[in-house]
Image: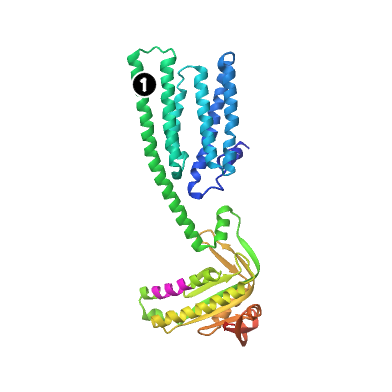
Amino acid sequence: MLKRFLKLWVWAGIARYPNEYFPPVRITNIIACIVIAVSLLQIPSAIWFWQGQGAFQFLITCLTIFSLIWVPILNHNALYLAAKMWLITVYITNLITTCVLWELDLYIHFFYLLAVICCPFFFTERENIYKWSFSILFCGLFLVTETYYQIYLQQNYDAAQQSFKFASACLLALASILCSYHIQKNVSKSWKKLAHERKRSEQLLLNILPNSIAQRLKNSNEPIADYFAQASILFADIQDFTPLCKKRTPQQLFKILNEIFCRFDELSLKYGLEKIKTSGDGYMAAGGLPIATAEHATQCCNCALDMLHEFKQICKKQNLNIGLRIGIGCGEVVAGIIGKSKFSYDMWGEAVNLASRMESQGESNKIQTTESTYQLTKSAFHFTQRGKITVKGIGPVTTYWLQGRK
């Protein structure tokens, strides 16, 4: 129970905060928790000296604890700067009232210098003005309190000892500022590097998975498997690419294939398709998932026509004697992530099998579609009926050639 409560306290507000700056929010919550723990340790002393200043100290401690409970609440409501200001205000108020109440040099004011050291972790780089303003304020409060103890309280020090003691306090404050500056530079560099690496890793993840799937994968350990009642699958395969491998160098082959697939990627993005994978000289994309849409078949047909056009342009430019077969199928699809290492977003179902057969049993530089694709898009595109072909595992299937837009 306590562990769960502390976890909720420490992580309050982090889910809504920009990823690259979540550490200051967590540190704010942790410092508030630590101050509460230290305040609780003062309660036995307050009870022991109840007849003196103990009763007042008990009241100060209770007010401090109650006030700090609002820090994670403010963070949870995305009031991050307000949470920091409130924590600092409560912290300073507690130290000032405690020092004035006991009127003894109990070294409580040294906690101001501790706050100076914590400031680099406490504020983001965009909040530097607050960081240095409060660092200077904490040092000033430390020196003012030290002066107050030396001038107004009875101390067994002569003038020389008092001067030396004050000079030491000034050096300690200066050392705290310099230490804070050094920590701030290193912390800022570390956070920038962390943000860069996180952005890079997320970009790599988005290159492998659709955005919505990547977010689900990051936020949950549950298996990802979704059913789509209607989706369209597009397969494209380069014909006679294998013989080309014997005539060109690896660098030339890579350049050709990369140019073709990069253009296919642009077209998939343009028409709202989700690139699923490439396999050798084959390309697979899908419409209507992972976000369902009624225009999935139209999207695939538009994309296929442009793919064929762009492929012919590249072949003409590169003087290539190769062709492109494209197949489109529509129907039920199950999509999800398989595996724990080197995982990929893939899909299964009759629509996938049909689209694959439309491609493999198609003809060079033609787009073959199923009956379902034809029925969904015949009002927007020109088709020519090919007739029936035998599809392994399914049987005779009526297919159509996609000719162009109406």
Where does the image place residue 298, in percent across and percent down from the top left? 60, 75
Magenta segment includes 357 = no
Badge 1, how many Cα within 10 Å: few under 14, some, many 20+? some
Q: Is residue 384 above or below residue 293?
A: below
Which residue is disc 1 drawn over?
166
Q: Residue at x 43, y 34 (%)?
A: 135
Q: Residue at x 47, y 17 (%)?
A: 104
Q: Is residue 167 above or below residue 119?
A: above
Where does the image place residue 228, in percent across and percent down from the top left? 65, 67
Along the line of sight, the residue nearer the viewer: 368 or 375: 375
Q: Which residues are magenta?
A: 254-263
The amino acid type of the residue labelled 1 equals Phe
Q: Is residue 172 above or below residue 127?
A: above
Can residue 122 be seen in the rendering of this structure? yes
Q: Secondary structure at mark 1?
A: helix
The quarter of the rendered structure image containing the N terminus is: top right
Where does the image place residue 145, in percent across and percent down from the top left? 44, 22
The quarter of the rendered structure image containing the C terminus is: bottom right
Look at the magenta stretch and give its main secondary structure.
helix
Q: Is residue 299 above or below residue 151?
A: below
Along the line of sight, the residue nearer the viewer: 272 or 254: 272
Q: Residue at x 38, y 31 (%)?
A: 176
Can residue 356 be seen in the rendering of this structure? no
Q: Residue at x 41, y 32 (%)?
A: 136
User: Please, which colouring scheme is shown?
Assistant: rainbow
